[in-house]
Amino acid sequence: MTDPNPFLYTHAIVRRPGKDFARGITTARLGKPRYNRMLAQHKAYIQALRSLGLEVDVLESLPDFPDAYFVEDVAVVTPEIAVVTRPGAAARRDEADAIVPALARYRPTLRIQPPGTVEGGDVLMAGRHFFIGVSERTNREGAAQLGDILVEYGYTWTPVPLAAGLHLKSSATAVGPETLLIGADFAGLAEFKSYEHILVDPDEAYAANTLWLNGSLLFPHGFPKTRQKLEALGLPIIDLDTSEARKMDGGLTCMSLRF
Ligand code: CIR
């Protein structure tokens, strides 16, 4: 039988949303983001990470970087190294410097170099393999730089061109060692064919960003059809309200670095 929990995460890094978080980049039209609600949802998220045994470092919000609490985008962390990215969104680029000290405590850190751009939301780890989305935020040069580093540490990778959507993990996440949860836009994609698929209904597209962590699933509140499909996996599901992050185009994976 395949080990359902092959890798135990022990640490996470998160950053508190700032009072100005509503000034971040967004394409969502879901109403005015509420700071108090955002903070409460973020606290519940930290609590969920702790409940799964992770030690969570909580960084303070970063003045002038309203998207900086989406810490997933500024690094890719493996058991061996941390690769600090170079975000493709110009307004977010300098968030990368600010994550270095927090990661250097735990891992040797490497950097993506210009003209490469990478955002961690485009990087999907599936066992020893990485899918790297080539998107508006992650360019081919950045994907290749990251891929070369990963290969040095014994991983394999494939680029996945994105036709639409913000990041690869907005539409595809791993929910088991061989199982991907994927949005309709990725159904049938050749790159994913050797994995089991759970398909997300087009009207629940946001639920594709689910976080499989230490044998549980952190799942966004309000997507019953996807939840029902995931229940078949037999894993505990932790339901979290992400309404405010969603207003800013973010989700559950985006708000932490896990390692
Ligand atoms: C942005 O547009 O960069 C942020 N407002 C949302 C980033 C979400 N991050 C992620 O999917 N990893």
Image: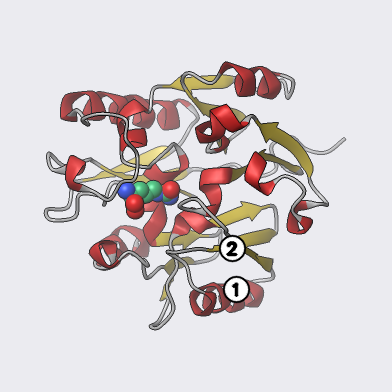
The mark closer to the camera, 2 or 1, is 2
Q: Which quadrant holds residue 41?
A: top left
Q: Which quadrant holds residue 227?
A: top right
Left or right of residue 142, residue 41 in this image: left
Q: How crowded is mark 2: few (under 14 residues within 10 Å), some or many (20 or more)?
A: many
Left or right of residue 203, residue 19 in this image: left
Q: Are marks 2 and 1 in contact (CB under 8 Å)?
A: yes
Residue at 45% x, 25% y is: 51
Label 1 secondary element: helix
Task: Name the outermost residue toward the right.
Answer: 1
Give percent across and percent down for residue 230. Answer: 67, 24
Left or right of residue 84, residue 5 in this image: right
Residue at 37% x, 67% y is: 88
- Rendered view: 100 above or below 141: above
Label 2 secondary element: strand
Q: How many marks?
A: 2
Q: Name the residue under label 2.
A: 132
| Residue type, label 2 | Ile
Q: Is residue 17 visible?
A: yes
Q: Is residue 256 visible?
A: no
| Residue type, label 1 | Gly
Left or right of residue 85, residue 16 in this image: left
Give percent across and percent down for residue 83. Answer: 45, 68
- Rendered view: 128 above or below 51: below
